[in-house]
Structures are given as structure tokens and as C-alpha cells.
Image (cartoon, helix red, strand yellow):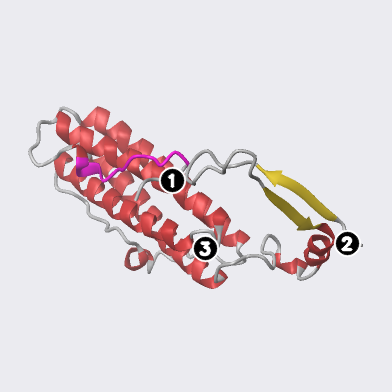
Amino acid sequence: MPHKSTAHARPSTTGSTPASPGESTPFVQDVEALRRRARENMECGAITQSYGADRQAVVDVLNAALATELVCVLRYKRHYFMAQGIASESVKSEFLEHANEEQGHADKLCERIVQLGGEPDLDPQTLSARSHSQYVEGKDLVDMIREDLVAERIAIDSYREIVQWLADRDPTSRRVMEEILANEEEHAEDLGSMLQGMGLAGVDASASGSRPSTGNGSTAR
């Protein structure tokens, strides 16, 4: 007789309708089937038969996000070195911090792409064309901050769409994108606050494009 594992899932307290008192749904696994499938197509590594997405399509989407992150690294780095003016020192430190965090995002995306059996596209000749955000140098400190804020807002909308598209078909890639999205919202909030602190018109609390958390690790949509 196949070995089956049975457990009772606890009702979720967030994001779904609570179960009635005493109500539970049995969680049953065919352990023997899991063991058998694990030995099949072992060359696929982390990708098992239950993977529900189009793997190449996910790799392509993650590579586009990777290009976006790398362009952001380069733009923030230029702004860090070129920033001048009375308020430049504090702004420069933010530029550098953001650049380092964007590089961290790029590394996470590379790791996930490789886990999916793909190859990170780091071709510098096509990087800008594949990026969702643009590489804009900025003519002065304020212009640099504005351009970085625009780029972050583009990334936020793009990454929200990616998270929604991935849904439950690839929860690991979705979590990677959700983590990056949350950090991009923080960046946008920082940049919006900088512009507000400089007393510039046309920047309000909504300029960052951030939205409240849903309480389950993702942002409200």
C-alpha cells in the first residue's frame, strides 16, 4: 500500500475566509509517488514535475527584470560620483546604498534564473534596450533624484505585474520578485522624501508609488 502522509491544515488567519469552528481540510500526500518523481529527470535540479509555469517564459521575464536592475545600478553609481551641491553628501550616501541594493537584486535574479535552468543575460550591448527603466544621467542633483524616482516607479509597476503574472505557478520566483518590489518601494519613498525635503513642488506622498502591505508579504494592488 502506498505510504500516505496525512495532516490537518490550520485555517489561515489572513488573506482568506476563516474556516468554521471545528472545520479542517485533510492534507494528504502520496509519499511513494513523491519519491518516485524525485528520481525522474534529476538533471532538472530544482524543477520538478509539479512546476506549473512555462519555465522559459519565466526566465525571459526574470532576465528583463535583471536588465532593469543592472541599469539602475549603473545610473545610481553615476549619480553617486557626479552629485554636487550643498545637500550632495547625504544624497550621495543614498545613491550608493541604492546602487548596492540594486546589485543585490540582480544577484538574486541571476541565482533564480540559473535554478530554473536558464542563463542570466548580462550582455552589455543589449542591456539598455532590455531594461524597463531608462539610463538618464541627470543635469543636476535634483534632476538626478527625479530621474531615479521615475525609474523606481517604473520598476514598481513592472514588478507588480510580474508578481501577479507568476501567481501560484512559480511561488519561489514570485517571492523573489515580491522582496525586490518591497525594496524598490522603499527606494521610491526615500527619493520622494528627498524631493519633499528640498521643498520642491509637485511631489506628494503618492509620488513614490508605494502601497500598503497586505500583511502576507506582498503589496496591495
Residue 162 appearing in the image: yes
Question: Regarding mark 3 in the picture, which secondary structure is present there?
Answer: loop
Q: Residue at x 56, y 44 (%)?
A: 19
Q: Please tell me in which quadrant of the rendered image residue 85 appears.
A: top left
> Which amino acid type corresponds to the residue marked 3 in the rendered image?
Pro
Query: Is 201 left or right of 5, judged from the image as shown?
Result: left
* Disc 3/disc 2 C-alpha distance (Å): 41 Å
The reply to whether callout 3 and callout 2 are in contact (CB within 8 Å) is no
Closer to the camera in the image, 114 or 126: 114
Q: Would you name the residue on which mark 3 appears?
A: 120
Q: Is residue 51 above or below residue 190?
A: below
| Residue projecting furthest to the front | 21
Q: Would you name the residue on which mark 2 appears?
A: 2
Residue 136: x and y in percent read 22, 54
Q: Is residue 127 above or below residue 83?
A: below
Q: Please tell me in which quadrant of the rendered image residue 36 appears.
A: bottom right
Q: Which residues are magenta?
A: 206-216
Residue 106 appearing in the image: no
* Disc 2/disc 1 C-alpha distance (Å): 38 Å
Q: Residues within 10 Å of mark 1 (few under 14, many from 20)?
A: some
Q: Residues within 10 Å of mark 2 (few under 14, many from 20)?
A: few
Total labels drawn: 3
The reply to whether callout 1 and callout 3 are in contact (CB within 8 Å) is no
Closer to the camera in the image, 114 or 179: 179
